[in-house]
Amino acid sequence: MLSMLLLSIAGYAQDDTDTDTQKSNIQEYTPSKLLKKGQWDIKFFNSLYTQTKSTDEGSTSFDIPRQNFFTNTNEIYTGISDNSRINIGLIFQVRANTFGGQDAFSVFGFENNSTDARSGLTTIAPSIRFQPIASVPNFSLTSSVYFPVFKDTPNAPYLDKRSVFWETKFFYDKTFGGGDWQIFTEMDLGFNFGEKSQDANPVDSNIGERFANNSLFMPFSAFLSYFPSDKSTLFINGQQAFLVDLGNDFSQRYTQLGFGGKYQITDVLNLEASYGKIVTGHNFQGLGHTFSLGLRALF
């Protein structure tokens, strides 16, 4: 279990860290900040999205039987450059989904059947982070290519997108108010590659998992954080996202609002919890809630 590994690392590294001469990791190592050569960043992030409403082909909402989507995202990065401007890493994701009105916690059964449950390892992604402008250390990019590794099962419940997904994230943050406040912004460009859903063979292909093929995913996010202490932060956030049709005859958009917090448990390990609500959507977009919990070890 990666979570147990993080706890072990935290206990081992704490004795060798001088807390009197360092900022906490949540203050210093924002998503915009890259690692020094030889540093490691391991993140274990869990997200549960559950919905009982969706939109029609427009933006009018209607009730649906509850659907639940659990995602476990694991990220491992290390610094490789003397100037702290290049990091490399690996991401892998495990998902579990349930349908047909099951309760939100049903995903933790990690079941697989042909009607209302699906789970498994879904994607693996090599990733690189870099700082393009030396004079702007709080601006960075992360580029990752996600490869689907789960079995293509026709007529099975939805598990994940059946596409190679190339995603580049642009990060920028600015601290102000004597260090008590911080604004963080993120813009993503994600290309979904793959055959059109209408061109796939339904005998050996899951058509529903190809809905996003040949599309561009563009979420724009902003976080406003307040630091009550050097070991804790509270934030509010908003996101506007677009799925732009590039040939698959399908597009979507949604708006999400949320809040959360982080706490530095040890010199190495910090905890993050957040909540999000999709408040508007278009073209069969779910209008649900997201509950997230993450552990991060940085050493």
Image (spheres, rainbow, N blue to C red):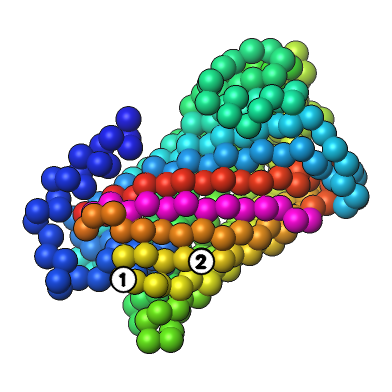
Disc 2 packing (10 Å; few <14; some 14–19; many ≥20): some
Q: Is residue 86 above or below residue 124?
A: below
* Sequence-wise first label, 2 or 1: 1
Q: Is residue 273 visible to the viewer in this orientation of the structure?
A: yes
Which of the pair 199/87 is nearer the observer? 87
* Magenta residues (range): 268-280
Q: Residue at x 69, y 62 (%)?
A: 240
Q: Could you tell me residue 32's position as x and y percent?
A: 41, 67
Q: Compare residues 178 and 5 and report the one nearer the observer.
A: 178
Residue identified by numbered label 2: 235
Q: State the separation of the CA atoms marked 2 and 1.
A: 14 Å
In the image, taking residue 140 as reference, residue 78 lies left or right, namely left
Please give the name of the residue rendered at 82% of the width and 34% of the height, measured from the top-left corner: 64
Amino acid carrying mark 2 in the image: Phe
Indicate left or right for 225 with 243 as reference: left
Q: Are marks 2 and 1 in contact (CB under 8 Å)?
A: no
Give the labeled residue for mark 1: 230
Mark 1: secondary structure: loop
- Image point 74% across, 31% down: which residue? 66
Residue, far left? 16
